Amino acid sequence: MTKHTGKSEGTEKQSAKDQSMHAILTAAAQVLSEHGYAGTTISRVAETAGVSRGLLHYHFKTKEEMLAEVLQANMEKSVAMTDTIFSDCKSAESFADNLITAVKSLFDTNPQYLNLFLEGVVTARHSDAVRRALESLYTSFRESLKDGLSEMERAGIISPAIPPDGLAALIAGMLDGIGIQFVTVPGLAQDEENWNYRRKGLLVLLTTDRS
């Protein structure tokens, strides 16, 4: 007869806890993406995840706490994208190409991303927890952009029309606008001419000397 040590039992319990947490967050992302903030209920998420309401409440005390976790994880994908954007950037053109490629890849590999992005904006109006989480991540994203752009400017790779902090805020705003347009205008994400215009716009910002 096999004996289980306290350590192995603890590991199994933690594994089960992690699995149930993953199932809940995956279900919450699906429900929020498909039904929006108002249509995302504890009961609907529990049913989609295949868990009891009691187990869901064990992990999350409120709907807002659960959605804050989902939306934070979604936004973290944007923050992680900055590593790719500044990888091997030796010219303004390579930065623009990297940014466009990274954004297109983010949208292609994460079908729920754009819907969750918009729901995050809506949910932030109702939930301080969501607003604080997204505010922190937006700040982190802009800071990462600013740091990378500052390094490129010091290296003489770019000569932006505005300081790096303003440029970072402008690029972040441009990406937000892209997200809204792609949700409201079906097919725009596949319009290569549209992407080319955005690339040209970036190059104007990156290569115009300040007066």
Image (cartoon, rainbow, N blue to C red):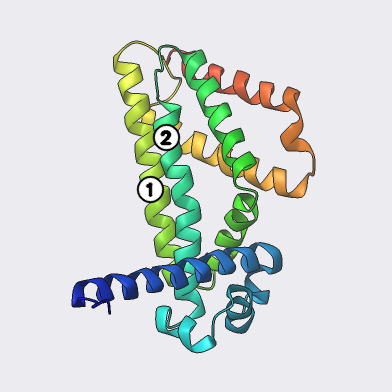
Q: Measured from the top left, where is residue 137 in percent x and y?
A: 40, 52
| Picture layout, residue 43 above or below residue 172 | below
In this rendering, would 182 be left or right of 118?
A: right
In this rendering, would 187 be left or right of 2?
A: right
Q: Measured from the top left, where is residue 32 in percent x and y?
A: 62, 67
Taking depth in this image into account, of 182 and 208 the one nearest to the observer is: 182
Identify the residue at the far left of this view. Answer: 6
Locate the N terminus by quadrant.
Answer: bottom left
| Picture layout, residue 105 above or below residue 192 | below
Question: Which residue: 49% across, 16% down?
Answer: 94
The answer to whether residue 57 of the structure is visible from this angle is: yes
Q: Residue 82, which numbered label?
A: 2
Question: Which residue: 66% across, 68% down?
Answer: 36
Taking depth in this image into account, of 156 and 69 the one nearest to the observer is: 69
**Label 1, label 2: how many angstroms apart (C-alpha)?**
13 Å
Give the class, few, some or many, for how many residues have Cα within 10 Å of label 2's Cα (few <14, many ≥20). Answer: some
Taking depth in this image into account, of 13 and 181 the one nearest to the observer is: 13
Identify the residue at the far front of this view. Answer: 1
Residue under circle 1?
139
Identify residue type, mark 2: Thr
Q: Measured from the top left, where is residue 149 in percent x and y?
A: 37, 25
Question: Which residue: 42% across, 41% down?
Answer: 80
Question: Which residue: 40% across, 23% down?
Answer: 87
Q: Earlier in the sequence, mark 1 or mark 2?
A: 2
For the image, the number of numbered tags is: 2
Looking at the image, do the residues carrying marks 1 and 2 touch, with CB atoms under 8 Å apart? no
In this rendering, would 198 be left or right of 70?
A: right
Locate the C terminus by quadrant.
Answer: top left
Identify the residue at the far bottom of this view. Answer: 54
Q: Residue 5, which numbered label?
A: none
